[in-house]
C-alpha cells in the first residue's frame, strides 16, 4: 500500500513475503479544513492474499460521512430505498417447486419499482465467466405492500442463488444481495438400484439443465449426440485454459479426458486447439509462468498433476513449449508428482475436511486417474483406494442424504444449499442416497467411470431407530484436525475438536447440528459485518476468531474469546425457524424440533432473535467477546415433550472461574474445560487424539450391542 496525505508521500509499504503476515501503523496529521488522502493498494501480488486497512480518527470532533450525489437526487428517497433493502427477507430458506416469496417493510413502501437480477452459473462451473443472460424481473410495489411473490421455483434452474435486488433514484442504484436455495421436486426421487442407470440419469440432467461447460460437453459425447453443441462449449471454455485463468485446471482435466476418451468423435479443429493448449499450458510451479493460477491446495495440486500426467501420456513425442520438455518426460514427472500426492493423501487424507465444496474436486481428479489407467497399474490401484477412502468418509458424515458436518473449508452456498451440493450428487451416484443435482465437477468423472463404491460402507448411512454411530479420527496436514461425530436416525452433531482455538479463522466450520438438509443449527463469530458478503470468512461461513470446540456424544461446547481489536463483538447462531416444525425458547436457550429430532442451544450471555432485516427469523445473536455456547441433539422419544427439553437446556449450569476454567453441569454429566484446553467428562479424559485418518467407529444399539 502506498499512502499520500495532501499530495505528500507518507509510506510505501511493500512487505511481499510469501505466507507471512505483516502489518504496520502510520499516523496522519490532518491540517485544518480539507485534507486529501489517497491510498493505492497493489491489486495482485498472490492469489488469496488479503489486504486490510483501518482508519481510526483520534480527534475530538464527531465525524460525518458524505457521499456526493447530483442535485436532482431525492436524498430522502435514497435513504428510504436503503432502509427497504435492509429490511426485506425471504419467507423460507429453500423453495421446493413452490412459490418464491418475500416479506417487505410495508410502512416504507410507496409506489415503488423493485428490480431482481439473478445470474445463472458459478465461477467454477463456467470458465469464461459468461454465464448467459441474467434472469431479470421488475416488480411494481403498491403503497404499504407487505408481501411479494417473486416467481415459481420451477421458473429458474435449481441452485443456491444470490438474489440481487435493486432500486433506483435518478442515476443512483441501491442494491442488496440475499441468498436462497431453489429446488425441483423431480430431482429428489430415489433412483434405480443399478448405478449405471443412475449415472445415465445424471448425464441427462447435465445435458438438459447443466451449465454450458466442459462437464456438459463430456455428457454429450458419452451419450453419443450433440457433438456440435459440445464442441461449441469447449471452444468457449478453452480460451480460459489458454489464458491460465484461476481454476482452469478444474476444466482442463475434463477437456483432456474428452480428447483421450472421445478422440474419434472430435473435429480436426478441436483436436488441434486442445493439442496446442496442452503443449503451451503451465502444469506446475517448477515451470515458467506469470499467472494467477493457484497450485497449493490439495485439490488443485491433484488436478494439475492429473493434467500433466495425461497430457504427457497423450503427446509423448511432442515438445511442450512452456516447460521445454517432451511429452514422455512430462508424463513421468506428472506421475512422480501424483505418487507423492497419493503418499501424502493416504497419510493425511483431506486437509479441508468434509468439505462439500472441495470433496467433489478431489473426486474429479481421482476418478479421472481411475478412468485413464488400467487394472494392475499402481496408479489405478491408488486412485481406487483414494476413492474408497472418500466413500468411507462421506458415508459416515451423511445424514438424510447430505453431508452436513464440521468442514475444513466451506462457503455459505454449501452450508445453506445442501439440496444442490456436489456431495449430495456424489451420494446419489455412489450409494443411491442423496439425489440428483446440477453440480458437474466430480460427478461427471464418476458418471463416465465403472468405479463402484464399497458396499460395506452402506451400514453407516440410514441408521435405524435405536442405533447410534460415533466416529473419531484425525486428519489433515501434520494431523492438524481432530474430528468427533455423533449421529442416529434423527440427528447428527459434528465438531472439529480444539482446532486452533482463539486464532484468526478462515473458512473453517467448527460445529454443525443437523436434523435434515434445511433444519440445521450452526454457530460462528462473523468474519465480516454484512450478511451475504464475499469475505473469507464471511458473515456465516468461517469464523473471524475461532472458538475452542469440544464434543462428547450428543453434546457440543464452543468457547469464544474475541480480542478487543476485532471490531465484531458478538457471536451468533443460524437457526432458520421456518424450516422446523416446532420451536420455543427463553432468554438463554432455544430448542427446535422436526420429524422426531431435537436440537437445543444454551448460551452464557443470552440470545436475541433478529426480527428485522435479511436474517430475520433465522439469526440469534449473543453479545459479548467472551461467551460459551452449548449445543445438544436428541430424539423426541427421550422426552415427554419439547417443553421438557427446553427446561433441561435452561437448567444447564455454566461456571467460569477467575483462572478461566469452565465447568458445565447437565443432570449427571459434568464437563470441565481447563485453562490448558483439556476436556474432562465426569472427571475422566474422553479423548485419545491423535488417531489415524480412518479413526474409530462405534455403533451402539438399544440392546447395548456394539
Image (cartoon, rainbow, N blue to C red):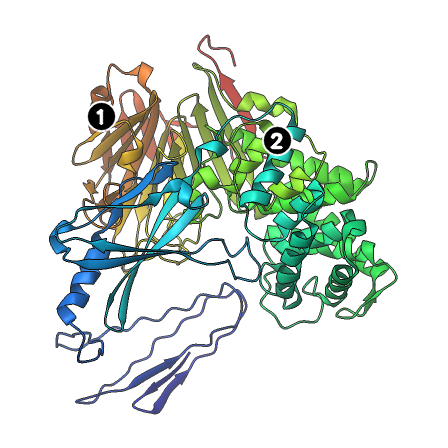
Q: Is residue 489 left or right of residue 657?
A: right
Q: Please name which of the two marks, 1 or 2, marks the residue nearer to the observer.
A: 2
Residue holding disc 2: 198
Q: Which image quadrant is residue 665 in?
A: top left
Is residue 311 or residue 631 the one in the foreground? 311
Where residue 93 sits in the image (x, y, percent)? 33, 40
Q: Which image quadrant is residue 663 in?
A: top left
Where residue 95 sits in the image (x, y, percent)? 36, 38
Circle 2 Cα neighbour tier, 10 Å, few/some/many (<14 / 14–19 / ≥20): many
Q: In terms of sequence position, does the residue under pointer 1 or pointer 2 come before the other? A: 2
Residue holding disc 1: 646
Seen at 19% across and 40% down, the residue is 606
- Mark 2 and mark 1 in contact (Cβ < 8 Å)? no
Question: What's the CA distance linking mark 1 and mark 2?
Answer: 43 Å
Judged from the image, the secondary structure of the residue bearing numbered disc 2 is helix
Where residue 650 sits in the image (x, y, percent)? 20, 28
Q: Is residue 387 above or below residue 105?
A: above
Q: Is residue 18 left or right of residue 367?
A: left
Seen at 38% across and 33% down, the residue is 513
Where residue 36 sits in the image (x, y, percent)? 28, 86
Amino acid at each position: 500500500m502506498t499512502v499520500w496525505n495532501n499530495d505528500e508521500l507518507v509510506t510505501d509499504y511493500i512487505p511481499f513475503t510469501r505466507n507471512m503476515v505483516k502489518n504496520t501503523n502510520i499516523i496522519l496529521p490532518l491540517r485544518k479544513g480539507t485534507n486529501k488522502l489517497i491510498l493505492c493498494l497493489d491489486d495482485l501480488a498472490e492469489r488469496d492474499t488479503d489486504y486490510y486497512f483501518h482508519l481510526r480518527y483520534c480527534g475530538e470532533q464527531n465525524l460525518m460521512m458524505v457521499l456526493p450525489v447530483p442535485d436532482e437526487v431525492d436524498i430522502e428517497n435514497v435513504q428510504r430505498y436503503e432502509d427497504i433493502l435492509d429490511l426485506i427477507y425471504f419467507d423460507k430458506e429453500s423453495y421446493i417447486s413452490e412459490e418464491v416469496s418475500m416479506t417487505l417493510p410495508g410502512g416504507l413502501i410507496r409506489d415503488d419499482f423493485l428490480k431482481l437480477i439473478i445470474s445463472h452459473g458459478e465461477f467454477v462451473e463456467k470458465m469464461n465467466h459468461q454465464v448467459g443472460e441474467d434472469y431479470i424481473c421488475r416488480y411494481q410495489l403498491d403503497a404499504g405492500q407487505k408481501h411479494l411473490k417473486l416467481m415459481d421455483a420451477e421458473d429458474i434452474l435449481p441452485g443456491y442463488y444470490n438474489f440481487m435486488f435493486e432500486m433506483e433514484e435518478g442515476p443512483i442504484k441501491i442494491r442488496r444481495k440475499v441468498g436462497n436455495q431453489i429446488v425441483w421436486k423431480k430431482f429428489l426421487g430415489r433412483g434405480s438400484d443399478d448405478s449405471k442407470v443412475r449415472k445415465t440419469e445424471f448425464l441427462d440432467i447435465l445435458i438438459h439443465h447443466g451449465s454450458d461447460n466442459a462437464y456438459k460437453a463430456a455428457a454429450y459425447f458419452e451419450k453419443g449426440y450433440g457433438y456440435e453443441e459440445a464442441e461449441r462449449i469447449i471452444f468457449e471454455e478453452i480460451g480460459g485454459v489458454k489464458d491460465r485463468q484461476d481454476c482452469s485446471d478444474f476444466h482442463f482435466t475434463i477437456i483432456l479426458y474428452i480428447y483421450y476418451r472421445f478422440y474419434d468423435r472430435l473435429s480436426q479443429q478441436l483436436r488441434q486447439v486442445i493439442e496446442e493448449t496442452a503443449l503451451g499450458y503451465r502444469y506446475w510451479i517448477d515451470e515458467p509462468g506469470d499467472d494467477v493460477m493457484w497450485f497449493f491446495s490439495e485439490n488443485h495440486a491433484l488436478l494439475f498433476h492429473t493434467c500433466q500426467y495425461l497430457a504427457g501420456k497423450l503427446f509423448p513425442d511432442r515438445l511442450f513449449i512452456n516447460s521445454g520438455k517432451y511429452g514422455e518426460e512430462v508424463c513421468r514427472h506428472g506421475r512422480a508428482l501424483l505418487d507423492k500426492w497419493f503418499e501424502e493423501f493416504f497419510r493425511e487424507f483431506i486437509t479441508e475436511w468434509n468439505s462439500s465444496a472441495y470433496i467433489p474436486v478431489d473426486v474429479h481428479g481421482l476418478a479421472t486417474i481411475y478412468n485413464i489407467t488400467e487394472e494392475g497399474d499402481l496408479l489405478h490401484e491408488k486412485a481406487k483406494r483414494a476413492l474408497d477412502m472418500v466413500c468411507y468418509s462421506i458415508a459416515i458424515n451423511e445424514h438424510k442424504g447430505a453431508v452436513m458436518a464440521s468442514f475444513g473449508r466451506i462457503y455459505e452456498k454449501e452450508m445453506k444449499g445442501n439440496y444442490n451440493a456436489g456431495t449430495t450428487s456424489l451420494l446419489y451416484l455412489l450409494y443411491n442416497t442423496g439425489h440428483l443435482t446440477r453440480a458437474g465437477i466430480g460427478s461427471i468423472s464418476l458418471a463416465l467411470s465403472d468405479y463402484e463404491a464399497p458396499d460395506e460402507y452402506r451400514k453407516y448411512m440410514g441408521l435405524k431407530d435405536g442405533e447410534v454411530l460415533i466416529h473419531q479420527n484425525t486428519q489433515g496436514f501434520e494431523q492438524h484436525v481432530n474430528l468427533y461425530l455423533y449421529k442416529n436416525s434423527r440427528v447428527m452433531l459434528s465438531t472439529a475438536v480444539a482446532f486452533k482455538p482463539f486464532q484468526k479463522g478462515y473458512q473453517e466450520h467448527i460445529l454443525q447440528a443437523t436434523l435434515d438438509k434445511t433444519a440445521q443449527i450452526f454457530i460462528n463469530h462473523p468474519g465480516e459485518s454484512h450478511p451475504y458478503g464475499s469475505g473469507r470468512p464471511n458473515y456465516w461461513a468461517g469464523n473471524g476468531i475461532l472458538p475452542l470446540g469440544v464434543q462428547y456424544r450428543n453434546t457440543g461446547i464452543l468457547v469464544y474469546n474475541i480480542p478487543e481489536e476485532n471490531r465484531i463483538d458478538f457471536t451468533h447462531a443460524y437457526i432458520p425457524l421456518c424450516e422446523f416444525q416446532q420451536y420455543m425458547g427463553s432468554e438463554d436457550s432455544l430448542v427446535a424440533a422436526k420429524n422426531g429430532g431435537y436440537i437445543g442451544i444454551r448460551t452464557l450471555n443470552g440470545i436475541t432473535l433478529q426480527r428485522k432485516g435479511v436474517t430475520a427469523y433465522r439469526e440469534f445473536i449473543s453479545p459479548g467477546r467472551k461467551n460459551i455456547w452449548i449445543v445438544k441433539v436428541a430424539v423426541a422419544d427421550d422426552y415427554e415433550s419439547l417443553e421438557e427439553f427446553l427446561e433441561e437446556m435452561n437448567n444447564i449450569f455454566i461456571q467460569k472461574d477467575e483462572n478461566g476454567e469452565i465447568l458445565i453441569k447437565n443432570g449427571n454429566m459434568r464437563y470441565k474445560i481447563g485453562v490448558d484446553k483439556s476436556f474432562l467428562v465426569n472427571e475422566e479424559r474422553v479423548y485419545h487424539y491423535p488417531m489415524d485418518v480412518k479413526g474409530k467407529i462405534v455403533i451402539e444399539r438399544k440392546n447395548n450391542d456394539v
